[in-house]
Amino acid sequence: MKRREFLNRTSLLIGSGFLVPRSLGSSGRVTGEEMESSVRVPDLVVASGSPRDATRRALERFGGLKRFIRPGHVVVVKPNAGFDSPPEWGATTHPEILAGVLEACFDAGARRVIVADHTTRPAERCFQRTGIANAVAAFPKAKLLSLDDPQAYTELEVPAGRALRKVRIPLLLLKADAWINVPTAKSHSATGVSLGLKNLMGLVYDRHAFHQDFDLHQGIADLATILRPHLTVLDAVKILKTGGPVGPGDVASRDTVVVGVDPVAVDAYGIGLSTWNHETLRPEQVGHIRMASEHGLGILELEAIKIVDLT
């Protein structure tokens, strides 16, 4: 799908009332000026080095978070903190990548940043062992929140869903001015790989349905039609090549971060950073990435987009 077609489809999705960030224009719609600005900046920025510095440089080259965050905004950041795995395993978002994102949010004027995930193990243990609790604690205006309370969710219909028709997602996403997806790059026993699109499942209350009631890949792609982050910041500091999603396994130290608005393009680029369970994969071979592209959610062909490599 070419850039113009992608932008046209994005405008149609926004106009159809899909869940999109409210800070894109005063009415929650993308303005012509903002759409033009989004064309001028790169589609993806890739940076390497120390995790926090690489995050800072990538975000700056991408135009900075002031593109999405206004002074006084409340921002939600969704890392992968689902397991009680240490950062060295690569199974969860590196705390220094998260710290870099939080720093950029507050530099852009955010009044408050809520770091939230629905963990698969006891939340306090996951937050502590991953290093995420300490990363958040360094920012007085940031809050770490477990999404394990069923009262924190509301049910939404998925109008474009082919398998997923309804889903319960956190109320805080509806109230936030902006939100950022900060996944880690790792292998996965059920989907082959877990990157940005797969990380959205941490915003779903009942994940069992995805594994039991319908095709998992289609469910993830359907979910992405209503969960549309402003930005995806892919952590590829420690890539868990095997043994995912929990680890331990074979880990490659890449010290890399990938930043982009297009969730399909971010995942398509991430696929090429490693082998996954000893296999070399192309983006179209991963069902949920291909299906998200078929939904019109992004560009699968990397040759069709502008990538700035700061590595």
Image (cartoon, helix red, strand yellow):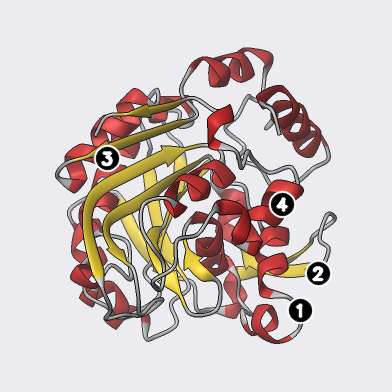
Give the spatial CA distance, label 2 vs label 4: 12 Å
The picture places residue 247, in percent across and down from the top left corner, at 31, 80
Q: Residue at x 41, y 57 (%)?
A: 183
Give the secondary structure at mark 3: helix
Q: Amino acid at mark 3?
A: Thr
Q: Amino acid at mark 2?
A: Ala
* Of pointers 2 and 4, the one earlier in the residue sequence: 2
Dots 3, 2 in contact, CB < 8 A: no
* Of pointers 3 and 4, the one earlier in the residue sequence: 3
- Between 60 and 236, the residue placed more toward the observer is 236
The picture places residue 88, in percent across and down from the top left corner, at 18, 69
The residue to which callout 4 is attached is 225
Q: Quadrant of the C terminus?
A: top left
- Between 191 and 36, the residue placed more toward the observer is 191
The picture places residue 67, in percent across and down from the top left corner, at 46, 25
* Of pointers 1 and 2, the one earlier in the residue sequence: 2
Q: Badge 3 local density, few (<14 within 10 Å), some, or many (20+)?
A: many
Q: Badge 2 local density, few (<14 within 10 Å), some, or many (20+)?
A: some
Tell me the tag on residue 163.
2
Above or below 116: residue 77: above
Q: Residue at x 54, y 41 (%)?
A: 265
Give the secondary structure at mark 4: loop
Q: Badge 1 local density, few (<14 within 10 Å), some, or many (20+)?
A: few
Give the spatial CA distance, label 3 vs label 4: 26 Å
- Between 122 and 96, the residue placed more toward the observer is 96
* Of pointers 3 and 2, the one earlier in the residue sequence: 3
Q: Badge 4 local density, few (<14 within 10 Å), some, or many (20+)?
A: many
Tell me the tag on residue 158.
none
The residue to which callout 1 is attached is 214
- The residue positioned farthest toward the left in the image shown: 50
The picture places residue 194, in percent across and down from the top left corner, at 47, 65
Q: Residue at x 20, y 47 (%)?
A: 51
